[in-house]
């Protein structure tokens, strides 16, 4: 048995959740925050049999696409802000970061 932990952008979370339910996979959703953009993320915890890992990874890949987005940079703290010009920067967002962990035992009460 495996535990799949997938960190996805909030914009993708409802689509992924619907696809998991449609394919009869149960998941626990946790609100999380990204460290780089300080943007909202959703972390999915999905317990699956070893043979189902590839199917869940395909569902995640189909529903969590990366894309380009313009982001306003954060102003420097404590530095000289006179020379700071906040031009938007294009960054890649979305997609999914996935961790697959072995599960020794699983209980459901």
Image (cartoon, rainbow, N blue to C red):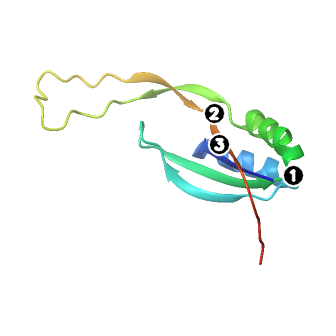
Element at label 3? strand
Label 1: which residue?
22
In the rendered image, residue 1, in percent from the top left (x then y), is placed at 81, 53
Q: In terms of depth relative to the viewer, which is nearer, 87 or 44?
A: 44
Query: Which mark is first along the chain, 1 or 2?
Result: 1
* Rendered residue at 12%/37% (across/down): 78
| Nearer to us: label 3 or label 2 | 3
Asked if labels 1 and 3 touch by Cβ distance under 8 angstroms, the answer is no
User: Going from the N terminus, do you reach mark 3 or mark 1 first?
Assistant: 1
Mark 2, residue position: 95
Distance between the alpha carbons at the discs numbered 3 and 1: 22 Å
- What label sits on residue 99 in the rendered view? 3
Q: Position of residue 42 (x, y in %)?
A: 59, 50
Q: Nearer the viewer, residue 99 or 86?
A: 99
| Residue 68 x, y percent position in the rendering | 55, 24
The x and y percentages for residue 59 are: 80, 40
Mark 2 packing: few (<14 Cα in 10 Å), some, or many (20+)?
A: some
Q: How many angstroms separate mark 3 from mark 2 (CA)?
A: 13 Å
Image point (19%, 24%), residue name: 84
């Amino acid at each position: 048995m495996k535990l799949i932990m997938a960190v996805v952008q909030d914009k993708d979370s409802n689509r992924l959740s619907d696809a998991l339910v449609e394919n009869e996979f149960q998941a626990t959703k946790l609100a999380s925050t990204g460290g780089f953009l300080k943007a909202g993320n959703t972390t999915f915890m999905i317990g699956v049999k070893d043979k189902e890992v590839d199917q869940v990874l395909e569902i995640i890949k189909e529903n969590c696409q990366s894309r380009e987005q313009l982001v306003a940079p954060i102003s420097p703290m404590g530095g000289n802000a006179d020379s700071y010009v906040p031009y938007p920067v294009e960054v890649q967002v979305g997609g999914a970061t996935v961790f697959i962990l072995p599960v020794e035992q699983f209980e459901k009460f």
